[in-house]
């Protein structure tokens, strides 16, 4: 009796299991029949983590600005340039306070004329970050260890000056930039100073401390020198005496590039680029903020994405 009872119980359990399985299959089939087929969008699949240059290699742009996979990456398009101009003065990193220069004239064939040493060069610890500037027949340079030199346009040395502060040692800092207006050369340095030198003799006129390295180039217009320091502050300095006229603070950042960028200055505005990736425009005389925008993009998952510094100088056109 016990054996027969157990057999009946097992048969009942198996029947219940089979019933549940068949019910589950029926419900799944019913749901599958009710669901719509997933639509697969046409087009090429790109890896979200792929570098921009690799993604651009597969894309292009048509005439209306839309991106299409079949458009060529490199296309020949007509351009129209203004007449070339011979620039005797090159007062800023990119020629002018606006960083916009008229089409420069250049000979069809170039030849080596002269070369001279400007001091210490690049090494593991030091970098030359200053572009040369030219004014009144003089070429001004800044080496990797805070030595400023002036040469004639024929290569003859006119003067040399070390702008290392007396409280620091040679080689304690590196980087800086140059700008010239009138007979005054303005020099920023990794020592956190803006130095004004007589362009003819190299004599020091004044020094303004900025409390942070200022390794980007200055910009000067109508008696005001504009500088961006590495602690995300924009400065407006009186060119005649070195006194601070006003300053503009932006968001702080933990990491910046060696060298840095220079402000762009027009008749009415100054545009400061900051290490935080922020671009701030202000009235250049009073320092009142007009607008601000973050322009630095980044790709997640990349180590360099943590560096938000702007690496190109802003340009004012118009």
Image (cartoon, rainbow, N blue to C red):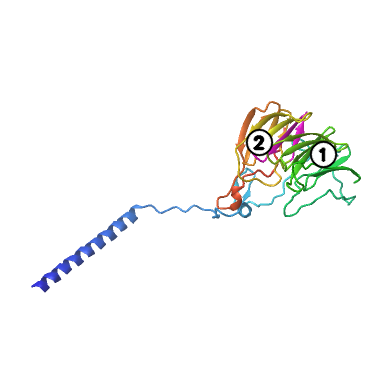
**Furthest residue in direction left, as rendered:** 1
Q: Secondary structure at mark 2?
A: strand
Task: Return the mark for residue 167.
Answer: none
Residue 120 placed where, x, y %? Answer: 80, 50
The answer to which image quadrant residue 63 occupies is: top right
> Does the CB distance between marks 2 and 1 fall below 8 Å?
no
The answer to which image quadrant residue 274 occupies is: top right
Question: Where is the N terminus found, in terms of image quarters?
Answer: bottom left
Q: Residues within 10 Å of mark 2 (few under 14, many from 20)?
A: many
Q: Taking 20 as reference, is 60 left or right? A: right
Which residue corresponds to mark 2? 233
Q: CA distance from mark 2 to mark 1?
A: 26 Å
Residue at image location 61% in from the left, 34% down from the top: 292
Residue at image location 51% in from the left, 53% down from the top: 42
Of 6 and 230, the residue lying toward us: 230
Task: Return the mark for residue 90.
Answer: 1
Of 229 and 299, the residue lying toward us: 229
Res. 272 visible in picture:
yes
Question: Where is the C terminus found, in terms of image quarters?
Answer: top right
Q: Is residue 42 magenta?
A: no
Res. 79 visible in picture:
no
Q: Which residues are magenta?
A: 217-231
Q: Taking 297 as reference, is 83 left or right? A: right
Residue 223 placed where, x, y %? Answer: 78, 29
**Furthest residue in direction front, as rendered:** 167
Q: Secondary structure at mark 1?
A: loop
Magenta highlight: main SS: strand
């Amino acid at each position: 009796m016990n054996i027969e009872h157990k057999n009946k119980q097992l048969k009942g359990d198996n029947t219940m299991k089979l019933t549940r399985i068949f019910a589950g299959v029926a419900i799944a089939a019913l749901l599958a029949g009710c669901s719509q087929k997933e639509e697969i969008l046409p087009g090429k699949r790109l890896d979200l983590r792929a570098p921009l240059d690799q993604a651009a290699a597969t894309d292009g742009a048509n005439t209306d600005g839309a991106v299409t996979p079949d458009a060529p990456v490199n296309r020949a398009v007509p351009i129209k340039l203004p007449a070339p101009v011979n620039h005797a003065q090159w007062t800023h990193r990119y020629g002018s306070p606006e960083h916009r220069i008229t089409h420069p004239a250049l000979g069809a064939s170039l030849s080596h004329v002269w070369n001279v040493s400007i001091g210490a060069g690049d090494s593991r610890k030091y970098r030359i970050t200053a572009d040369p500037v030219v004014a009144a027949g003089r070429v001004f340079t800044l080496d990797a260890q805070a030595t400023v030199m002036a040469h004639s346009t024929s290569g003859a040395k006119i003067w040399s000056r070390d702008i290392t502060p007396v409280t620091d040692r040679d080689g304690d800092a590196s980087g800086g930039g140059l700008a010239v207006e009138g007979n005054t050369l303005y020099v920023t340095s990794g020592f956190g100073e803006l130095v004004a030198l007589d362009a003819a003799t190299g004599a020091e006129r004044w020094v303004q401390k900025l409390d942070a390295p200022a390794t980007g180039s200055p910009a000067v217009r109508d008696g005001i020198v504009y500088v961006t320091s590495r602690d995300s502050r924009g400065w407006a300095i009186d060119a005649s005496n070195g006194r601070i006229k006003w300053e503009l603070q932006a968001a702080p950042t933990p990491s910046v590039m060696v060298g840095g960028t220079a402000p762009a200055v027009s008749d009415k505005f100054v545009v400061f680029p900051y290490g935080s990736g922020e671009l701030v425009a202000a009235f250049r005389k009073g320092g009142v903020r007009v607008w601000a925008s973050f322009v630095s993009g980044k790709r997640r998952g990349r180590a360099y994405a943590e560096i938000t510094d702007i690496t190109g100088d802003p340009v004012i056109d118009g």
